Every structure is written in structure tokens, then in C-alpha cells.
Image (spheres, rainbow, N blue to C red):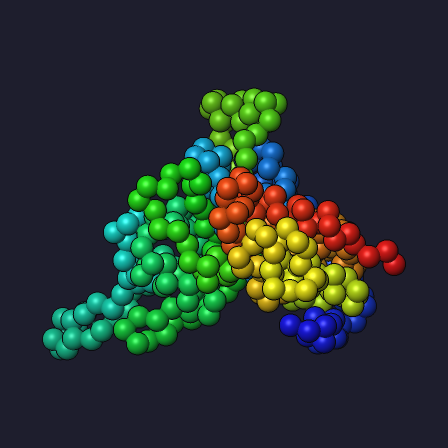
Amino acid sequence: MDNGQLMSTTVTTQMEPEVLKARIDRFRQVQKEIVTQVRRVIVGQEEVLEQVMIALFVGGHCLITGLPGTAKTLLVRTLAQTLGLIFKRIQFTPDLMPSDMTGTDIIEEDPATGHRTWTFVQGPIFGNILLADEINRTPPKTQSALLEAMQELSCTVRGNTYILPKPFFVLATQNPIELEGTYPLPEAQLDRFLFNTILDYLTADEEMQVVDLTTTTKVAHADTITTAEEILSFQQLVRMTPIGESVARHAVDMVRATRQRDESAPDFVKKYVNYGGSVRAAQFLVLAAKARALMHGRYHVTYEDIRALYIPVLRHRILLNFHAESDKLRQDDILKMVLEAKAAPRD
């Protein structure tokens, strides 16, 4: 991906200034209302909520990693309710088959004529927001069916291809502490996720709010404030957000710095990293930064947008070697070291 490709998104769509300003104002209004509605149900997790919303506005998928009881499922369900989208949930298990997810053909007989025909019955993948709960508990055969849906926005059953509804988001959860009976996600599938978002424990005050919110007769509810069509228009608006060549170059340089064979890679990357971020990482980093800029009330992307999203975009795209394991270093540690080693340019 060169700078020409990055810059081209700023000139593909022309729009009257008044219309563009109205759409940006509506984008920000909806974004604030989404946060307000989600806050009725979800306590804390500001960074997580921002990243999931960026994924929705970009049209990307999000992998949510968190311990049991950290409200992963509740967050996804509440967002779907707020966005007015069709919500579907699949509990991934070792015996889950691809047809359990995509749907299957059945034979139906016409009572009048006795004529039999194949009829396709849609599976739970035919929704707008798909919660793939504990995605790492199902075998590769089933994960591959989800891979097609994430990349091609379609699924194939008995040689027939079916287009999924738009918008389509996969918000997948996985439990980081239970490894027995799990199937680690292939690198090709991990690369399809825009973010790997980490849900951590709440603060003591936030935990008190959760207890107060969930142990009384009051039932928290989020209202619907937008539509599928409007979300699709927001995705186009995000892609129209301008980014300067120097900022786009910084995003590309930061991704290239994670590749051990790249001349710009710091020495610690060459020591600890087997494989760095892909080209898709740079694409997603720029797209996510565009959404963040709009959400923060700016009309262009800054270095700060790139650097703020660097770790969640890259943490699942780099593979560490045994040196890193022996020194007890994780992906986040390496990426923080890259951020410290490569400061933003001073314009």
C-alpha cells in the first residue's frame, strides 16, 4: 500500500460543503447518543467502547479478549440494540459445524404436487452484528466458514454463494485463561480483525456501580438511535476524512518497524519478533485513525490518532519468538517499546 493509495480516499467522493458539514454533525450527534445509551447498561471500559465503535464506523471486525464476567457479551448486545441492527449470537463449541453457522439446504415437498425442491434455510450468520462467543473453542473447519464471511461478506453452501446483509460486523470474544480444549485462531483469521480489544477488571468505584445497577429490580435498557442505512453512510464519511502524507507515512513506518527484516526495525524487534504487521495492519491503522479523528471533533487525522490506536491494531498481528518468551515479554511490551523508540515527526 503506497501513499497514492492512502491519499486517494480523500478525493473519491465530492460533496457540497453544507451537506458534508450536516453529515459530520449528525455523525458526532449519533456517536454521543450511542455512548449515552450504552452507559445506561455498561459501566466503565471507555477505551474498549471507543475501539468497538471505531470498528463499527470503519466496517471492521473486533476481537474482544477478557476474563469471564467482564461484560463482553452484554456490551455487544447493548450496542446492537442501540444501533437498531439485527443481532445474532453463536456460542462456539468443539462440535459446532459450518452449517450450524451458515445455514443449510433442506428438501421441501409441495403437498399439492408432491414435487420436491431444495430450500436454503439461513443460519445465524445472516445478521448485522454477529457475536462469536468464545470463538477459539471451535475447530478450524468451522472457523474457516467464518473467515469467508469476514473477508468476502458472503458464505458458500453446497456451491451456492449467499450475500450477507450490510452492515456486517463480527464481534468475537475469547477467554485468555482457559486454553484446554481450545483451538488458537490462525494468523490469517486474526489478521482480519481490526482490533484485539482487551477488557480488564473495573476500578472499585465502577464495580460498586455495577453492583448497584444489577442487583435491584431496575432493568437497564438502551434505546435505538440510528439505522443500518445511516451506519453505512457513516462508513463512507470516515473514508472521506483527509489524512496528510506525513501522517500516513508515519503509520506505514510504524507498521514496518515491527518487521524484523525491515531496515527501519529497532534492534529489539530483530531480537524478539518472528513476524511483524501485515499490509492490512497499515490500512486498518489509517482507517481507524480517520474514525477516531471524527469522533474527537477533528476534520483531519493527526499523529496522536495513529499512535493511540497502534497497540490494539497491532497486538494480534505480531508473532514473538522464544527469546521474548524466555524474557517474559508480550506483544504489548514490544509495541510500547516501538512507540518509545520511534517518536512522531515534528512538523
Percent coordinates x, y for residue 195 in the rendering: 56, 53
| Quadrant in which residue 278 is drawn | bottom right
- The quarter of the image holding the C terminus is bottom right
Q: Is residue 124 above or below residue 219?
A: below
Q: Is residue 268 visible?
A: yes
Is 139 or 68 nearer to us in this picture? Answer: 139
Q: Residue at x 67, y 46 (%)?
A: 337
Q: Residue at x 45, y 46 (%)?
A: 173
Is 126 or 220 nearer to us in this picture? Answer: 126
Percent coordinates x, y for residue 328 in the rendering: 53, 39
Left/right of residue 153 with respect to residue 342 in the rendered view: left
Q: Residue at x 37, y 63 (%)?
A: 144
Number of on-image labels = 0
Left/right of residue 78 with respect to residue 163 in the rendered view: right
Left/right of residue 10 with respect to residue 270 in the rendered view: right
Left/right of residue 128 with respect to residue 100 in the rendered view: right
Q: Is residue 20 visible?
A: no
Among all residues in the image, which is located at the extreme left? Answer: 114
Percent coordinates x, y for residue 157 in the rendering: 31, 70
Percent coordinates x, y for residue 109 in the rendering: 16, 71
- The quarter of the image holding the N terminus is bottom right
| Quadrant in which residue 36 is drawn | top right
